[in-house]
Amino acid sequence: MERVSKRQYYLDIAAEVARRSTCLRRQYGAVIVKNDEIVATGYNGAPRGDENCCDVGVCWREAHGIPHGEQYEKCVAVHAECNAIISASRNEMLGSTLYLFGFENGKPLTKAEPCVMCSRMIKNAGIAMVINQTEDRPV
């Protein structure tokens, strides 16, 4: 039996976390790991208490023709990376690794990447590395 690598193990967990996403357009899952222990997970979805796109049946950004990579502030969702960061303490994140997996309309993305705002939050949180389906990159 061939054992799955730790990298793939955490990416697989991030993929499962992404399946909880409430976004109709893109589904992301993030897993923060430190010292080989999961610190926090997060997926993209509306803030607690707000209506989710999957419940309303429409993506606001898509309905208004906003292309990928633009005007993130108009999205009703909190991104997966931010939700994971919100759920962890700063000490737990210092020097940690964030595993990120994404789907678009249910199909795996070749390379899930944090947006510019999430990249800033990842750096400020003290996370040292971001790993996605195709690359490992220092923050």
Image: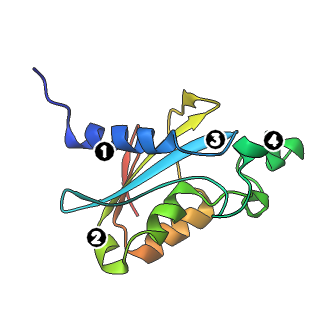
Confirm whether residue 67 shows in the render: no
Q: Name the residue at 57% across, 45% down.
A: 21
Q: Which residue is mark 4?
A: 58
The amino acid at mark 1 is Tyr
- Front: mark 3 or 2: 3
Q: CA distance from mark 3 to mark 2?
A: 28 Å
The amino acid at mark 4 is Val
Report helix, strand or loop for mark 2.
loop
Identify which residue, 71 or 2, lies in the foreground. 2
Compared with 41, 26 (above or below) is: above
Asked whether disc 3 touches disc 2, contact meaning CB atoms under 8 Å apart, the reply is no
The amino acid at mark 3 is Arg
Check residue 95 in the rendering and tell me which mark sits there, or answer none.
2
Location of the C terminus by quadrant is bottom left
Q: Name the residue at 43% across, 39% down.
A: 15
In the figure, residue 51 lies in which quadrant? bottom right
Report helix, strand or loop for mark 3.
strand
Q: CA distance from mark 2 to mark 1?
A: 16 Å
Q: CA distance from mark 3 to mark 4?
A: 13 Å
- Sequence-first disc among 3 and 1: 1
Residue 126, horizontal then vertical, whole percent: 37, 74
